[in-house]
Image (spheres, rainbow, N blue to C red):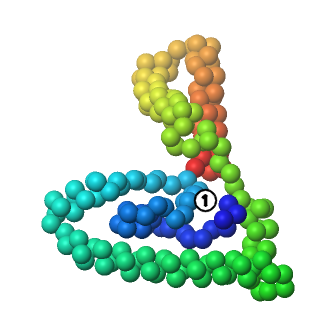
Amino acid sequence: GDGKTVFATLTKGAFFGETALFFKQKRSATIKAVEFCEVFQLSKSDLDNELRQREFDLSRMLDIFTKIANSNSRRNAAVASNLKASEQEGTKLHKIIDARDANLALTGKKINKNFLPNSVFRAVWDTMLMLFTMWFAVIILYRIAYTLDDALDDTMEWLYLDFAIDFLFIVDIYLNFTKFA
């Protein structure tokens, strides 16, 4: 494909790659996520072991996946036909897809790799915020119990640190709503 066209949108619990898994064929498509997602891989040997242990009817499974493969072939042929028709200027499909591409270019949001949940930056950031949260949970109570009567000058030094940590929490809220996946 062109790397921009979305052929299918899979939801939670969906799967792909069953043709290669059950019919011992090379993969027929490349899957690319539009946004962050979690994907799990199941090897042929692991699947076979699970099916044997559960005494699953393999012929029934093969029949189900043959129907799925046939359905996928029909759908893929229809998508290919529609894509070809969308390339012809003046057709309704061309107008729809061309307008949609323009809208995607305006709203498409690319996520920085450092902001993905499995990045080192996110691990350090989340750990730091967890430690600051625990700091506040302990130190605020300590100050109320033991240092409330001390001179204001002594507590001002700590207030600057508290304000800096509060600012980090505000930055975290901003990052969570705008940058993080």
Based on the displayed image, in which of its 4 quarters is residue 142 positioned? Answer: top left
Q: Is residue 60 above or below residue 47?
A: below
Assign the N terminus to one quadrant of the image: bottom right
Q: Residue at 22% x, 56% y: name it.
A: 49
- Left or right for 39, reference 162: left
Q: Is residue 51 above or below residue 155?
A: below
- The answer to whether one can see residue 166 in this image is no
Q: Residue at 71% x, 59% y: name it.
A: 108
- Left or right for 89, reference 141: right
> Closest to the observer: 8 or 89?
89
- The answer to whether one can see residue 52 in this image is yes
Based on the displayed image, in which of its 4 quarters is residue 20 positioned? Answer: bottom left
> Closest to the observer: 157 or 127?
127
- Density class for disc 1 (Cα within 10 Å; few <14, some 14-19, many ≥20) is few
Q: Is residue 43 above or below residue 16?
A: above
> Residue 112: percent from the left, percent from the top?
65, 43
| Extreme-front residue of the structure | 25
> Residue 139: percent from the left, percent from the top?
46, 24
Per the image, the residue denoted by label 1 is 34
> Residue 78: percent from the left, percent from the top?
60, 82
Q: How many marks can you see? A: 1
Q: Is residue 38 above or below residue 144?
A: below
Look at the numbered disc 1 and give the secondary structure of its residue: loop
Based on the displayed image, in which of its 4 quarters is residue 2 positioned? Answer: bottom right
Q: Residue at 18% x, 61% y: name it.
A: 52
| Extreme-right residue of the structure | 90
Three-letter code, disc 1:
Val
Q: Residue at 64% x, 22% y: name it.
A: 160
> Residue 33: percent from the left, percent from the top?
57, 58
- Left or right for 161, reference 132: right
- Left or right for 130, reference 92: left
